[in-house]
Image (spheres, rainbow, N blue to C red):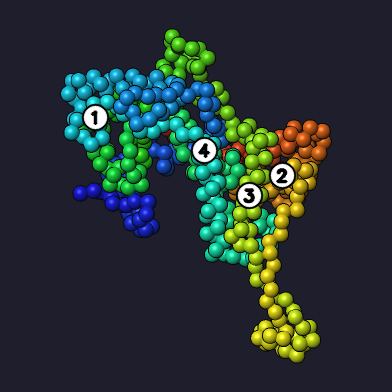
């Protein structure tokens, strides 16, 4: 009988009780990794608190005839995992692996790995817009121009805690750890079901497979047990990050490297990718959101005074409303966006929108004076530059710098979910 039958669709009480029982029955071991509670930002934020993205040039694709696709991970993890595959084959040959298992067969088969952040970001933005339409149906206020739309939209993402900018996405829970390049998955299943996860952990091969992984700095994820994480703090992984005889020195770090060196070499800070093209995409997304909104909600009802003299005959507005001679019902259509694309006015307008969006995403509350100070500065940087593209990028850099890193905004996150994770990979 399963310890917990909770799923992501369970009610709050069943989920709490079920997940508590599951954690008690299956406490995290030193050979495991917890990306749900202790290390939710692992591989997505560097030791300084910057949201990061992997440099795809350092990915290695792994593919055998048994794999369910061509999957990638960071190069040193690929080296470690390939060794684990050889050990696994030896275990199979020695009949140590129970092949009656529904999860472990003759080969260590891959089902998933690195996922491209651009695709996930676009999917997320579409997801946000669908939620926004649902939200609008339930909270319809009658939006007649772009300014009112933006105010309502920012209220929505604040209430729902939904990121919409590139940096906001990479700092959030909506960015899966798969984008880090530190993940490979050797199974498939519903990770939201405790009973499914329990079956994998209870498999007689689970501990046997865990040992060669841990001895090479790789760990199973307690949240998704068939997911393998490269523990970049592990002493056992160091020989793969800085091998004695590297095939290509440019792809590895020298002996004695520090944790931040991994991020500096293999990743780039997400704000560095908020360039001119990203700003153009940001503008296009908001324009598209509004234009699509107008298709769904093209007009709103509005009561206007039809006969002012008739109004005076009544004591209350309700009485007047009930008199067809006094009030009439009309429609107001949503206005077009009165901003010329790629004009100076449009750039300045959307720099303001970007700043306000980042403030909402970051959950900070700058004073009115500080907001105005920032506004004057990023606008000034844009206007000072004769080159429009450079001006936009300087303004964006100023905004992102002054919003601050995740660790700066949330001191408790200075651990960045890395310092909690010890180096020991022993049982």
In the displayed structure image, the side of residue 207 where residue 238 appears, left or right: right
Mark 1 or 2: the one toward you: 1
Q: Is residue 101 above or below residue 236?
A: below
Could you say which disc has been placed on residue 351 in the image? 2
**Residue located 42% across and 42% down the image:** 37
What is the C-alpha distance between the residues marked 1 and 3? 49 Å
What crowding class fits label 4: few (fewer than 14 Cα within 10 Å), some (14-19), or many (20 or more)?
Answer: few
Q: Is residue 177 visible?
A: yes
**Residue located 68% across and 64% down the image:** 333
Q: Which type of secondary structure does the marked residue at label 1 adopt? A: loop
**Residue on which disc 1 sits:** 105
The percent coordinates of residue 398 (x first, y second) are 71, 37
The percent coordinates of residue 177 (x first, y second) are 45, 36
**Residue on which disc 4 sits:** 119
**Residue located 48% across and 32% down the image:** 180
Q: Which type of secondary structure does the marked residue at label 3 adopt? A: helix
**Residue on which disc 3 sits:** 288
The percent coordinates of residue 401 (x first, y second) are 67, 37
Q: Earlier in the sequence, mark 3 or mark 4?
A: 4
Q: Is residue 238 visible?
A: no
In contact (CB < 8 Å): disc 1 and disc 3 = no
What is the C-alpha distance between the residues marked 2 and 4? 24 Å
Q: Earlier in the sequence, mark 1 or mark 2?
A: 1
What crowding class fits label 3: few (fewer than 14 Cα within 10 Å), some (14-19), or many (20 or more)?
Answer: few
What crowding class fits label 2: few (fewer than 14 Cα within 10 Å), some (14-19), or many (20 or more)?
Answer: many
Q: Earlier in the sequence, mark 1 or mark 3?
A: 1
């Amino acid at each position: 009988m399963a310890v917990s039958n909770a799923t992501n669709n369970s009610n709050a009480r069943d989920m709490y009780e079920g997940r508590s029982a599951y954690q008690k029955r299956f406490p995290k071991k030193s050979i495991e990794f917890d990306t749900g509670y202790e290390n939710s930002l692992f591989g997505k934020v560097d030791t300084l608190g910057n949201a990061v993205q992997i440099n795809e040039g350092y990915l290695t694709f792994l593919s055998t005839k048994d794999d369910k696709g061509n999957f990638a991970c960071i190069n040193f993890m690929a080296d470690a995992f390939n060794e684990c595959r050889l050990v696994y084959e030896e275990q199979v040959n020695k009949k140590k692996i129970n092949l009656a298992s529904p999860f472990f067969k003759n080969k260590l088969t891959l089902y998933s790995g690195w996922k491209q952040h651009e695709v996930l970001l676009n999917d997320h933005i579409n997801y946000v817009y669908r939620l926004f339409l649902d939200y609008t149906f339930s909270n319809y206020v009658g939006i007649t121009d772009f300014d009112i739309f933006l105010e309502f939209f920012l209220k929505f993402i604040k209430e729902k805690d939904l990121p919409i900018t590139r940096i906001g996405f990479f700092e959030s829970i909506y960015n899966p750890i798969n984008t880090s390049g530190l993940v490979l998955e050797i199974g498939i299943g519903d990770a939201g079901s405790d009973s499914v996860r329990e079956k994998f952990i209870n498999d007689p091969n689970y501990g046997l497979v865990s040992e060669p992984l841990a001895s090479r700095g790789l760990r199973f994820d307690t949240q998704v047990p068939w997911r393998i994480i490269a523990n970049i703090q592990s002493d056992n992984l160091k020989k793969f990050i800085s091998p004695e005889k590297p095939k290509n020195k440019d792809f590895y770090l020298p002996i004695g490297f520090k944790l931040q060196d991994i991020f500096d070499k293999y990743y780039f800070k997400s704000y560095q990718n908020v360039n001119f093209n990203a700003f153009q995409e940001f503008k296009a997304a908001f324009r598209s959101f509004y234009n699509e909104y107008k298709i769904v909600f093209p007009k709103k009802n509005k009561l206007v005074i039809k006969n002012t003299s008739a109004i005076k005959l009544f004591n209350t507005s309700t009485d007047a409303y009930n008199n067809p001679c006094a009030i009439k019902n009309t429609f107001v259509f949503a206005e077009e966006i009165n901003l010329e694309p790629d004009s100076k006015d449009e750039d300045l307008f959307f720099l303001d929108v970007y700043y306000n969006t980042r403030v909402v995403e970051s959950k900070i509350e700058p004073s009115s004076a500080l907001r105005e100070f920032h506004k004057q500065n990023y606008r000034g940087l844009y206007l000072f530059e004769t080159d429009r593209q450079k001006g936009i990028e300087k303004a964006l850099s100023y905004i992102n710098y002054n919003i601050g890193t995740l660790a700066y905004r949330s001191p408790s996150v200075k651990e960045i979910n890395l310092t909690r994770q010890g180096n020991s990979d022993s049982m």
